[in-house]
Amino acid sequence: MNTVSIQFFGLLAEITGKQNLVLENVSDTDNMKTAIQNLFPNLQKQNYMVAVNNTMINTNTALSNNCKVACMPPFAGG
């Protein structure tokens, strides 16, 4: 059983009402996004970036047991 720890930042934490969430049985980031969007439908309207174990990702990525995932709103440098 895969257990994944997810952190939400900024607007995403406001939408979910949570800073942390633990999900089980998620095999990859696409599966995780579907699961959190089912729990929090307002996330479907949001663009957000995902990091797995402190590495930003752009494509579907496999999640191993005890992975740490961060969901962050887009940000711009300045």
Image (cartoon, rainbow, N blue to C red):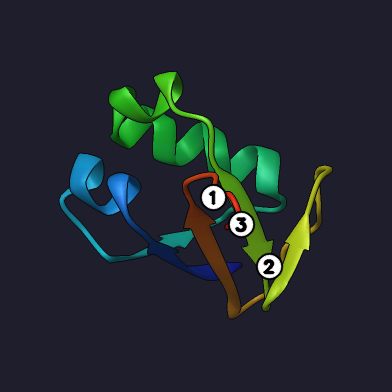
Write the residue at 31% across / 23% down. Answer: 41
Mark 2, mark 3: which one is toward the viewer? 3
**Secondary structure at numbered mark 3:** loop
Quadrant that contains the N terminus = bottom right
Dot 3: few (<14), some (14–19), or many (≥20) neighbours within 10 Å?
A: few
Q: Which label sits on residue 75?
A: 1
Rendering quarter of residue 64: bottom right
Look at mark 3 in the image and give the residue it sits on. 77
The three-letter code of the residue at mark 2 reads Val
Q: Residues within 10 Å of mark 1 (few under 14, many from 20)?
A: few
Which one is in front, 37 or 50? 50
Q: Which residue is mark 2?
A: 52
Inspect the image, locate mark 1, and give the three-letter code of the amino acid beneath it: Phe
Separation of disc 2 and disc 3 at Cα?
A: 21 Å
Q: Amino acid at mark 3?
A: Gly
Q: Position of residue 61 (x, y in %)?
A: 81, 53
User: Mark 1 or mark 2, which is nearer the start of the sequence?
Assistant: 2
Q: Is residue 9 left or right of residue 53?
A: left
Q: Secondary structure at mark 1?
A: loop
Which of the marked residues, 2 or 3, is nearer the chain's N terminus? 2
Find residue 57 and report its horizontal and vertical position in percent: 78, 55
Answer whether labels 3 and 1 touch (C-beta < 8 Å). Answer: yes
Label 2 with label 3: CB-CB less than 8 Å = no
**In the displayed image of the protein, which residue is found farthest to the top?**
45
Nearest to the eye among marks 2 and 1: give it.
1
In this orientation, which residue lies closer to the viewer: 8 or 67?
Answer: 8
The reply, left or right, for residue 46 in relation to residue 11 is right
- CA gap between label 2 and label 1 equals 17 Å
Residue at 67% from the left image edge and 77% from the top image edge: 54
Secondary structure of the residue carrying tag 2 is strand
10 Å neighbourhood of mark 2: few (<14), some, or many (≥20)? many
Estimate the x, y position of residue 78 in percent, counting from the top left.
57, 57
